[in-house]
Amino acid sequence: MYNGAKIAAVVPAYNEAKMILTVIDTMPDFVDHIVIVDDCSPDETSAVVASSSDPRVHLIRHEVNQGVGGAILTAHRAALELGADVNVVMAGDAQMDPNYLPTLLDAVTCQGYGFAKANRFFSPESFQGMPGYRVAGNIMLSFMTKLASGYWHLFDPQNGYTAIRTSVLKRLPLDRIALRYSFENDLLIHLNILQVPAVDVPIPAVYGNEVSSIRLSKVVPELLSLLTKGFWRRIWYRYVLWSFSPIALLLFGGILLSGIGLAIAVWVCFQIAASVVATAATVMLAALPLMLGSQMLISAWQLDIQASPSTPSYPPFTE
């Protein structure tokens, strides 16, 4: 136990026969359960796990590959059945340093947060040696996830080193969360809909020699689609269905007015191209909706940032 909470380590594993014992052997003593899900690995991952004598280990093997998100969700469900209070995700490739587990768990067990995640980029040195395109990609993906999820104070959304209260897990529609590489992004969207307070914890990354198998040509379109759908789902539940917030009125009104203004502006441009003189009134007919619409969108954005669930609200666990 840790700070009065029963801890379960959730470990998704795919072709991790070489590293999985390192993950088990370096797991801190305060972790009560180690739930390892072999996601239909073609190597000897399951056999290696089965050879461990650690009584905390629980092995589950998928007969069909479900992706990293599917493996994590399977482990989360198993940890719930084991009676865990807090689940922490640890990668099967030993790239998540267990020495930082107390820092991550403190945020959830005694600081009042329902969800905590690692952030590799708290210091300027974090970007040293990283190619420029990867820096730009991380920044762009983080901004898009902020917009979709509403967690404007969080960064590094693809970081899977996370801790979550099982009381929060029980409220989540686990069957609706994306199963593969967009799992972390979709999870944040669902957490925001439930207004779960979340926090970033500075934890440096541990990089190994593994070569990524992610195909950007496939992942990027899927991720963009998920973030777009997730954004509108969040807006619908949080600001329309459950509260009918002014944020929704400002957002929809801003989109409508901006669209009208843009359409009129395009029409005016065609008129000018056809040598038709545009009067001041005609120009203002396009400019006014654009100005009002953009101001409404900015106001909706500001209010959404203020509504980001960042204030701790959960009681600490007791010894």
Image (cartoon, rainbow, N blue to C red):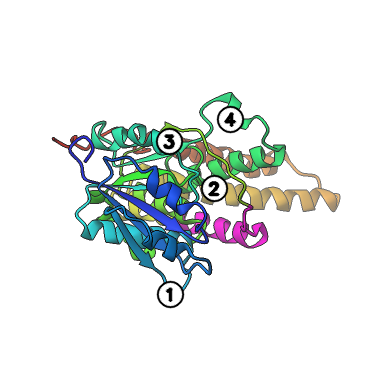
Q: Are marks 1 and 4 in contact (CB under 8 Å)?
A: no
Asked whether 121 or 75 is in front, the reply is: 75
Identify the magenta region: 211-230
Q: Are marks 2 and 1 in contact (CB under 8 Å)?
A: no
Residue 126 has which mark? 4
In the rendered structure, which amino acid carries the disc numbered 3?
A: Ile
Q: Which label lies toward us, 1 or 4?
A: 1
Closer to the chain start, of discs 1 and 3, is 1
Closer to the chain start, of discs 4 and 3, is 4
Residue 62 is inside the magenta segment: no
Q: Which residue is mark 3?
A: 305
Label 4 element class:
helix
Residue 70 appears anywhere in the view: no
Q: Which label lies toward us, 2 or 4?
A: 4
Where is residue 54 shown, x and y percent of the image? 31, 52
In the rendered structure, which amino acid carries the disc numbered 2?
A: Leu
Instruction: Decide: is 255 above or below 29.
Output: below
Asked whether 272 or 198 is in front, the reply is: 198
Closer to the chain start, of discs 2 and 4, is 4
In the rendered structure, which amino acid carries the disc numbered 1?
A: Glu
In the rendered structure, which amino acid carries the disc numbered 4?
A: Ser
- Disc 3 packing (10 Å; few <14; some 14–19; many ≥20): some
Left-right relation of 217 to 143:
right
State the residue at coordinates (57%, 43%).
289
Asked whether 227 or 274 is in front, the reply is: 227
Residue 63 has which mark? 1
Q: Which label lies toward us, 2 or 3?
A: 3
Where is residue 252 shown, x and y percent of the image? 46, 50
Q: State the CA–CA distance, disc 1 to disc 3.
A: 42 Å
